[in-house]
Amino acid sequence: MIISVASGKGGTGKTTVSTNLALSKNNAQFFDCDVEEPNSNIFIKAELNKKEDVSVFYPSIDKDKCNFCSKCSDFCAYNAIAVVPSDVLVFPELCHSCMGCGLVCPQDAISFKERVIGRIEYGRKNGIDFFHGLLNIGEMQAIPVIKKLKKKIDKKRNVIIDVPPGTSCPVIESVSESDYCILVTEPTPFGLHDLKLAVEVIRHLKIPFGVIINRDGVGDKRVEDFCRKEKIPIILKIPESKKIANLYSKGIAIVEESLEWREKFNQVFEKINNEVKA
Amino acid sequence: MKEITVISGKGGTGKTTITAAFASIEKNAVLADCDVDAADLHLILNPSIKKTMGFHGLKIADINKDSCIKCNKCYESCKFDAIDKDINIKKASCEGCGVCEYICPVDAISMKERDSGFSYISDTRFGPMAHAVLKTAEEASGKLVTVVRNNAKKLAKEKNKDIIIIDGPPGIGCPVIASITGVDMVLVVTEPTLSAIHDLERVLDVSKHFKILPLVCINKYDINIENTEKIVKYCKENGIEIVGMLPYDTIVTDAMINQKSVIEYSKADLSKKIIEMWEKIREKIK
């Protein structure tokens, strides 16, 4: 079963929820798909002794064969190739590796080289198989790193995915194929607004989902009203608490300090398990 | 004309709260919300929209099933896994490259414009604003960020404003890079948690990579003094100036609920500190 933890708005507690879920069970595969800013291992603390580079293809032009016809640059939807009267410029960081330029070149002047844009790292800790990805500084495209991470998923196991914030491509890539999605929000106007966007995305992808309200007690009741009206189950509330905020700031998971919370996160797991099976 | 972008790496550290506060202090600014994935600035600034423009992101493949001969060439050529074995386009995966259209031997595929969202030009009680909405499950948020920034620049020229304050997205990838390339400085908002410190270091590397001057604001500095000291030490070692240390205060949420900036809502210490921070930034950006 694959459970993804997403939010729309950043900083609502995705990592708190996903890491505590994983640590309450201690048998899951864990994927931190926020490859721009991965934080889950601050809480899981796995030793990441395995590493694999993530590479993408980009065109390399044989200028002896090239006749500067500019068919490649006309074809490229990403402005990654520019042809000037007697030269061709390639901008590798704009290239999406579709390989179309190679197809349209009448001179067979284009070959493809690989370049590294990030890496995935993984290791084991207390029964958790932990994986995360890192996009290199200055690189634009998170998707190839997320795709490489997701190849490691073993669908027969309990899988937990920490999803990046937002609602666009990296989010969709991370949550697609999940059996269930937890949307983490906070009871504030920003939290509600971005929850609504996230709900639209998850409904669009037809994935069953429920909401966890973090920092319950701040703000107002509009998130709860929205969930009730939309018939979205609220599967857990985590109260606004100095103690929890302090543990988070130090990189300590709540379930490691409190049996009560271990039990609560276990129940979330069971609830989702039952719902997915039903 | 100067541009400053508020970024953070980690989400939820207070970018929008601080941008909205700056908006209510600075009289000569254009505001731009470049967090087009999950834009929130309008919830405080309550813009009245003057002009709406359609946004077309990347194109999308459209298959004419009547002419398709199921040769599978498109399926085999697509590098984005956007075509399934039954030759259906997976809308969320298609990046609009056009390879399938090119390779199809019977011209059954054409690339169509997709309506990916809207960009807006608006008025707010603090001045003009450029913002946008990306439709559900659409791509090309980086491209839409560029549209918003261009709209903001036009507004600044028209209205004779000398600074653009940009509310940026979280992360370090495509939309962040689109939000910061060519700006005069970035303000990185962080908080004293291990997660935020990790993300701060990565986003500062991004600003260094693009050679943009970074300033740092430590929000909620008093929730973990030990971690705040770590940030201060890190910034000192790397020659990065901390322009503000803001205390944790529940008025942030109260102001948000009342659709007001912190500055409008309260004269508390927090508001004073933000005003001092903006004065420092104003001085630097000249």
Image (tube, coloured by chain):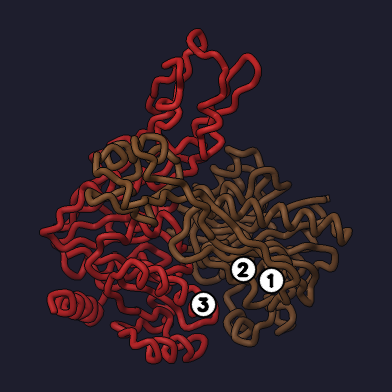
Chain colours: A red, B brown
Q: Amino acid at mark 2?
A: Thr
In which quadrant is the N terminus of chain A drawn?
Answer: bottom left
Number of the label disc, if any, that sits on residue B16 = 2
Q: Are marks 2 and 1 in contact (CB under 8 Å)?
A: yes
Pick the front one: B14 or A10? A10
Image label count: 3
Q: Amino acid at mark 1?
A: Ala
Q: Chain of mark 2?
A: B
Residue B169 location, x and y as percent?
Answer: 55, 59
Task: Residue at 76% x, 74% y: name it.
Answer: B124
Q: Are marks 1 and 3 on the same chain?
A: no
Number of the label disc, if any, that sits on residue A193 = 3
Work out whether residue B63 can be spotted. yes
Q: Identify the residue position indicated by label 1 in the image.
A: B20
Pick the front one: B170 or B131? B131
**Dot in front, 1 or 3:** 3
Residue A268 location, x and y as percent?
Answer: 22, 78
Q: CA distance from mark 1 to mark 3?
A: 16 Å
Q: CA distance from mark 2 to mark 1?
A: 6 Å
- Judged from this view, the residue extending furthest toward the right is B160
Callout 2 crowding tier (Cα within 10 Å): few <14, some 14–19, many ≥20 = many
**Dot in front, 2 or 3:** 3
Above or below: residue A150 compared with residue B53: above
